Image (spheres, grey):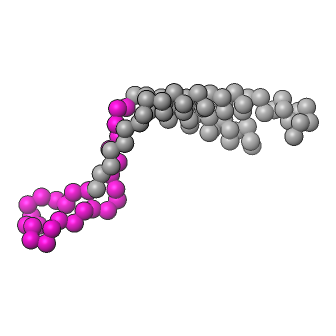
Amino acid sequence: MWRSFFLAVGAMLVIVGIETMVIDSATIYSKGTVQSPEGAEQSASPPRRATRVVQPEEWVPWTAMSIGAIVVLYAFTLPQRFARGGG
């Protein structure tokens, strides 16, 4: 069970690292909408959604991929650790 958990976490970190290396920025839309002002004409345009732009730093992809690779390697060594009676 622990092996599969760590393997999944490591693989997810590697995938997130690769994704953040490919993108320059990501725009996140919120669920709710921003209300238009009281006097504004309602049929002019639909209300805008609140957005947030995320730009990952240059070190984020490399850190995520390296931590993910270490966790995946750790997951492959778990059976040998438990077979020796180490915990």
| Residue 46 lies in quadrant | bottom left
Q: Is 62 left, or right, of 68 in this rendering?
A: left
Residue 74 in percent (x, y) is at 72, 31
Which residue corresponds to the image point at 9% horizontal and 67% vertical from the top-left? 40
Residue 15 seen in render: no
Q: Is residue 81 visible?
A: yes
Q: Residue at x 86, y 35 (%)?
A: 82
Could you say where residue 87 lies in the image, as x and y percent from the top left? 87, 40
Please give left or right for residue 20 compared with residue 65 in the image: left
Q: Please state which of residues 57 and 13 is positioned toward the viewer in this rendering.
A: 57
User: Horizontal and vertical percent for residue 4?
Assistant: 69, 39
Most frequent secondary structure within the magenta stretch: loop
Residue 35 is a magenta residue:
yes
Q: How many marks?
A: 0
Report the residue that reaches farthest toward the bottom: 38
Q: Residue at x 32, y 62 (%)?
A: 32
Query: As rendered, which of 67 and 85 lies closer to the eye?
Result: 67
Task: Look at the image and give the residue range highlighted in magenta.
Answer: 23-49
Above or below — where is 69 with respect to 2?
above
Q: Residue at x 17, y 65 (%)?
A: 36
Left-right relation of 24 to 79: left
The quadrant of the picture occupied by the N terminus is top right
